[in-house]
Image (spheres, rainbow, N blue to C red):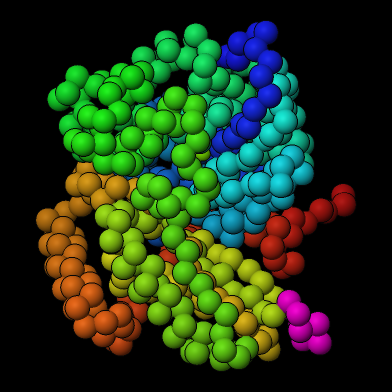
């Protein structure tokens, strides 16, 4: 397994992957003790399907993405608590988590809504497990969130260490994976090749045809062959498995896992339409980049901020997240999300200086990602829109960026998310603070 080797005492650079356990559910539980010990699910934007599950709900066999109407019998029988998604709360809890992590390291890199990489240097291997425990404890005490911590020499190995940490039934969910330890061979042998970070389903199929079934075989495969038959990217993944870092945190080496497009305005604006126009531009650029690297986005967010150097003006800075029911690369859907989020973020009377779009939780645009729940009608619509995007990208590539854009006549339908069971925005809205009633 992935326990560190006693007696190993090399000083090295290490990276920890800190990952929130059942993050959305845990955020809800942090403010609502009644949700502890029972099955809890968080639903998608329109209360349509399950997007986060507590362990108790997983144990009932409810799969990720299950349509709520199909599990009604279970809901009644097992007292399942279902909540509308509250992305304002989750984004704020994510910020808290990263604030706590920044006490442990100068280099914290948020990777997705519930995961961050933390560089740890100057540690002997023996001290790493203890450091991981302290991180886990600090987050439990200060943010009331459970996390798993995986520590290794590289991000790719830290991901695997994290999966190991989460498997632990008791004690701290912390695992250290030393690339040079003997036990690492067994662990990598037990890891199917598609579970290696950056190896998608299609790539895994090709590797399996060459007899590369697990992570250890990938690590030991001839590098020249990997470079020749595959790509530099795969050779880098191999280096990472050997404990040699190839990710410098910029994400340039592999398909990016986050895409960010933002810009300061020429002059601060207190006009919502103006800011929306700027965001529309950013969304289109981000969507293009997304399609270029053949990814889909699951979590979409926009942020707004006033100029922090204008102390004479009131300050406001905030981020909102939107979770798509299905991962998408569709500009129209992202524009709709941006409009909706901006409406909620916007505060009158503030002069906004910068706005941006951040795409998080990117996944491979493989057919496997498209839901089995899709009907032939929605599939047709999606294919039509995909063709439209392809044409747009091609024209923009040949005629110059921005030649064809979307933005006029966007449909308003479907904007009113149902969200009937959303918990209060405990941490970000004065109106929704928990009330204490004296009896
Ligand atoms: Mg997680």
Give the quadrant of residue 141.
top right
In the image, is 161 to the left or to the right of 367? right
In the image, is 132 to the left or to the right of 223? right
In the image, is 348 to the left or to the right of 67? right
From what the image shows, is residue 245 above or below residue 326? above
User: Which x, y percent locates residue 202?
Assistant: 21, 38
Residue at the spot 64% in from the left edge and 60% down from the top edge: 425
Residue at the spot 48% in from the left edge and 42% down from the top edge: 247
Residue 5 lies in the magenta-colored region: no
Give the quadrant of residue 125.
top right
Residue 310 lies in the magenta-colored region: yes
Residue at the spot 69% in from the left edge and 57% down from the top edge: 426
Can the viewer see residue 83?
Answer: no
User: Which x, y percent locates residue 123?
Assistant: 71, 27
User: Which x, y percent locates residue 14?
Assistant: 61, 31
Q: Nearer the viewer, residue 57 or 365?
A: 365
From what the image shows, is residue 389 above or below residue 351? above
Q: Nearer the viewer, residue 2 or 339?
A: 2
From what the image shows, is residue 5 above or below residue 432? above
Can the viewer see residue 241?
Answer: yes
Q: Please, what is the dominant secondary structure of the magenta stretch?
A: loop
From what the image shows, is residue 325 above or below residue 263? above
Count of picture labels: 0
User: Which x, y percent locates residue 315?
Assistant: 74, 78
Residue at the spot 68% in from the left edge and 28% down from the top edge: 132
Please state the extent of the stretch shown in magenta in the rendering.
308-315
In the image, is 243 to the left or to the right of 132? left
Considering every residue shown, the one lying at the far front of the view is 224
């Amino acid at each position: 397994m992935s326990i560190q080797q006693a007696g190993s005492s090399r000083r090295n650079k290490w990276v920890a992957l800190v990952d929130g356990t059942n993050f959305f559910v845990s955020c809800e539980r942090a403010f609502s003790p009644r949700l502890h010990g029972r099955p809890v699910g968080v639903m998608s934007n329109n209360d349509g399907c399950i997007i986060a599950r507590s362990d108790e709900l997983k144990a009932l066999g409810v799969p990720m993405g299950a349509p709520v109407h199909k599990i009604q019998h279970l809901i009644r029988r097992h007292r399942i608590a279902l909540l509308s998604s509250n992305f304002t709360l989750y984004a704020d809890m994510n910020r808290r988590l990263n604030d706590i992590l920044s006490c442990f390291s100068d280099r914290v890199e948020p990777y997705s809504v519930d995961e961050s990489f933390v560089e740890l240097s100057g540690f002997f291997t023996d001290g790493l497990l203890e450091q991981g425990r302290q991180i886990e404890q600090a987050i439990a005490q200060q943010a009331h969130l459970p996390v798993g911590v995986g520590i290794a020499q590289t991000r790719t190995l830290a991901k695997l260490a994290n999966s190991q940490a989460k498997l632990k039934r008791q004690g701290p969910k912390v695992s250290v994976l030393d690339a040079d330890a003997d036990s690492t061979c067994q662990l990598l042998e037990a890891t199917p090749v598609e579970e290696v970070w950056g190896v998608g389903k299609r790539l895994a199929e090709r590797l399996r045809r060459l007899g590369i079934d697990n992570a250890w075989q990938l690590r030991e495969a001839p590098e020249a062959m990997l470079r020749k038959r595959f790509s530099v990217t795969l050779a880098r993944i191999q280096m990472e498995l050997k404990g040699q870092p190839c990710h410098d945190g910029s994400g340039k080496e592999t398909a990016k896992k986050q895409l960010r497009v933002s810009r300061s305005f020429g002059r601060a604006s207190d006009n919502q339409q103006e800011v929306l126009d700027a965001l529309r531009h950013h969304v289109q650029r981000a969507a293009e980049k997304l399609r270029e690297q053949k990814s889909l986005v699951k979590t979409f967010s926009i942020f707004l901020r006033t100029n922090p150097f204008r102390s004479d003006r009131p300050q406001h800075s905030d981020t909102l997240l939107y979770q798509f029911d299905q991962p998408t690369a569709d500009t129209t859907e992202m524009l709709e999300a941006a409009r909706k989020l901006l409406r909620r973020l916007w505060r009158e009377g503030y002069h906004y200086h910068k706005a941006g779009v951040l795409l998080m939780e990117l996944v491979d645009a493989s057919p496997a990602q498209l839901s089995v729940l899709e009907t032939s009608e929605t599939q047709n619509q999606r294919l039509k829109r995909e063709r439209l995007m392809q044409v747009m990208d091609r024209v923009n590539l040949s005629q110059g960026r921005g030649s064809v854009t979307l933005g006029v006549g966007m449909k308003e339908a479907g904007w009113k998310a149902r969200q009937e069971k959303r918990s209060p925005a405990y941490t970000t809205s004065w109106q929704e603070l928990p009330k204490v009633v004296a009896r």
